[in-house]
Image (cartoon, rainbow, N blue to C red):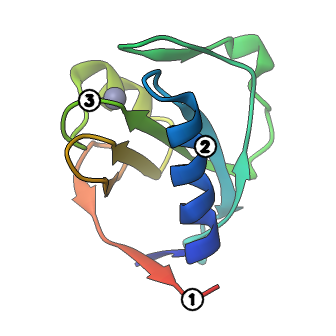
Amino acid sequence: MWRVKKSIVEDLIESSKKIYPKEFLCFLGGDKTSKEITEVVFLPTISGETSASINVLSMPFDDTIIGSFHSHPRGSAFPSKADKKFFHKYPINLILSLGEQINMRSFDENGIEIMLNITGN
Ligand SMILES: [Zn+2]
């Protein structure tokens, strides 16, 4: 099961709130083998109210990037068609909904919801 520290999740929530009502997009660094997310990788992104995109040229080409994160300022924490296409690149993808209540879900490269274990600091 994938694991992430609580402080990283708090960082992601904080960053998403800051950019609200725009969508926040960033990447996750860590270890694919031990299934652990260990850092948030901020990259220059273009944020919009309905989507966030990234200049592919600014994508790092090393394999320390193991996942993606983006917020849904409105609506549920489920992936859109475009999200699922994007998810193909990474084994772990998080969506945070800032709708009526804050809710985060994790998905694998096929857009299937998977469990994420949030551990203490
Ligand atoms: Zn989305």
Where does residue 27 sit, x and y in percent of width and height?
63, 42
- Disc 1 versus disc 2: nearer the observer: 2
Real-space Cα distance between discs 3 and 2? Answer: 16 Å
Q: Which amino acid type is marked by label 2?
A: Ser
> SS for tag 1?
loop
| Label 3 close to label 1 by CB (< 8 Å) | no
Q: Position of residue 62 (x, y in %)?
A: 80, 41
**Residue 100 lies in quadrant:** top left
Does the image show residue 8? yes
Where residue 121 sits, quadrant-wise, is bottom right
Q: Can you tell which quarter of the image residue 60 is in?
A: top right
Does the closest atom of ligand 1 sit within 8 Å of the Cβ of label 3? no
Mark 3 or 1: the one toward you? 3
Neighbours of disc 3 within 10 Å: few (<14), some (14-19), many (20+): some
Q: What kind of residue is marked 3? A: Arg
Residue depicted at x 74% and y 25%: 59
Q: Which mark is residue 74?
A: 3
Q: Amino acid at mark 1?
A: Gly
Estimate the x, y position of residue 102 in percent, counting from the top left. Answer: 31, 53
Query: In what quadrant of the picture does the N terminus appear?
Result: bottom left
Furthest residue toward bottom: 120
For label 2, the crowd category at 10 Å Cα-Cα, with few meaning under 14, some 14 to 19 and many 20 or more, is some
Give the structural element (helix, strand or loop) at label 2: helix
Q: Which residue is mark 2?
A: 15
| Residue 53 versus residue 10 in the image, above or below | above
Q: Nearer the viewer, residue 74 or 107?
A: 74
Instruction: Give the mark nearest the N terminus, 3 or 2.
Output: 2
Query: Which corner quadrant of the figure contains ligand 1?
Result: top left
The residue carrying mark 1 is: 120
Front in this rendered view, residue 61 or 8: 8
Disc number for residue 59? none
Residue at 75% x, 21% y: name it: 44
